[in-house]
Amino acid sequence: MSEQDNISPLGGGKKNLSDEKLMAYMAGKLSAAEQHEVEQWLAEEGMESDALEGLHGQDHDDTKHTINRLNHNLRQTLHNKKRKRRPANNNYTSWIAIVIILMLAVLAYLVIRKAI
């Protein structure tokens, strides 16, 4: 998964950590400085910290599968919610009604003008 595939936090301007870095943190494979950076980020982020806590109880492969499945489902939901444009169909009944109304308006104008 690339850095672009990560879902950015709602704050937008906040730094977003990659999935790989979070997985390495959970596996204990980060240096002390990187581990401190991740812990500092988690201290600032409430929801991400809770989510990571929940993932600690799972196996590494299960965690990766769960993250990928959640990202896929989220992208699919967002894609399906995009507004779909309906093609403009020619509704002849509407056009006929408009023409009849215009003709009645012109006829009414002529009748009123002749009466005056």
Image (tube, rainbow, N blue to C red):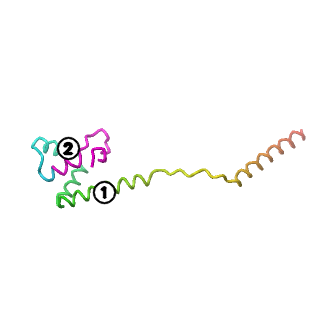
Q: Left or right of 104: which side holds 58?
A: left
Asked which secondary structure carries label 2, the reply is helix
Q: Left or right of 111: which side holds 39?
A: left
Q: Which residues are magenta?
A: 1-24
Q: Left or right of 31: which side holds 115?
A: right
Q: Reply yes or no: does residue 21 show up in magenta.
A: yes
Q: Residue furthest right?
A: 115
Asked which secondary structure carries label 1, the reply is helix
- For the image, the number of numbered tags is 2
Mark 2 residue type: Trp
* Front residue of 7 and 65: 65
- Image height of 81 relative to 35, above or below: below
At 17% from the left and 61% from the top, the residue drawn is 59
- Residue where numbered disc 1 is placed: 70
- Residue where numbered disc 2 is placed: 41
At 41% from the left and 52% from the top, the residue drawn is 79
